[in-house]
Amino acid sequence: WVTPVEIDAQNGNHLYTVAANALYRTTNGGALWDSLSPLGANSIAISPANGNIVWTLNLTTCRVSTDDGATWTTASPFGFPTSGGIKILADPIDANTVFVTFSAYTVGNAHVLRSTDLGVTWEDKTGDFPSQPVNTIVVDPTEPTHWFIGTDVGVWVSVNGGVNWLPLDDGFPNAVVVDLEIQDSGRKLRAGTHGRGMLELDISDI
């Protein structure tokens, strides 16, 4: 029920969104929108490394375009027990790499998956994270093995590429985190919560 809108990190006039009938793209800041296909999506990601690579996630299915939406390929099945996918994130450095996060409390389910080959294969990066919904993820472009996830139990961090996860709970309220972004020049992590506003953390010495 939250409409996804994705902006190209390299071109502020290049955006994607989705409506009930189609996926839409603009290349002129919203003055004109192109209807690309009748594909549904609950999350969209444009690669910061290559703006022609665009991902969509529709709960259990990922699709990728390498020509800015002209054609689409369905990624391979995840291959792990999961619930509905919530967030898709294109890696900030590697154009071939993408992350997907998943909801649910089910023990044994994957909560963070990664593909490094444009969705041909997937690997489980849940590590030792407990069985809690993971609503969003962000990768530090300065420290690519530092990953942050927004969950139903606050913000967690891995500094070893998803092997181990620890909560960043020093002063953080007991709130569901629905979005994360890194403001890299200032080395700030910003977390949008459900009902407790937005919070900011200095990550220069994580």
Image: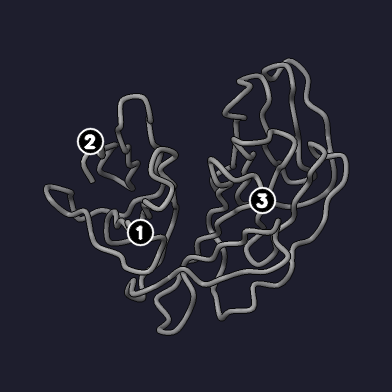
Which residue is depicted at the point 62% across and 61% down? Answer: 115
**Count of labels in the image:** 3
Labels 1 and 3 touching (C-beta < 8 A)? no
Closer to the eye: label 2 or 3: 3
| Type of amino acid under label 3 | Asn
The answer for how far apart the CA atoms under marks 2 and 3 are is 29 Å
Q: Is residue 125 above or below residue 191?
A: below
Residue designated by label 2: 202
Which residue is depicted at the point 83% across and 50% down? Answer: 72
SS under mark 3: loop
Q: Is residue 201 above or below residue 26?
A: below
Residue designated by label 1: 151
| Type of amino acid under label 2 | Asp
Q: Is residue 184 left or right of residue 156?
A: right
Q: Is residue 29 above or below residue 156?
A: above
On the image, the x and y values in percent for residue 40 come to 73, 52
Q: Is residue 206 above or below residue 84?
A: above
Q: Nearer the viewer, residue 129 or 161?
A: 161
Which residue is depicted at the point 32% across and 37% down? Answer: 190
Which residue is depicted at the point 44% across and 53% down? Answer: 136
Q: Nearer the viewer, residue 181 or 203?
A: 203
Q: Which mark is residue 11?
A: none
Residue designated by label 3: 96
Closer to the eye: label 1 or 3: 3
On the image, the x and y values in percent for residue 179 come to 41, 45
SS under mark 2: strand
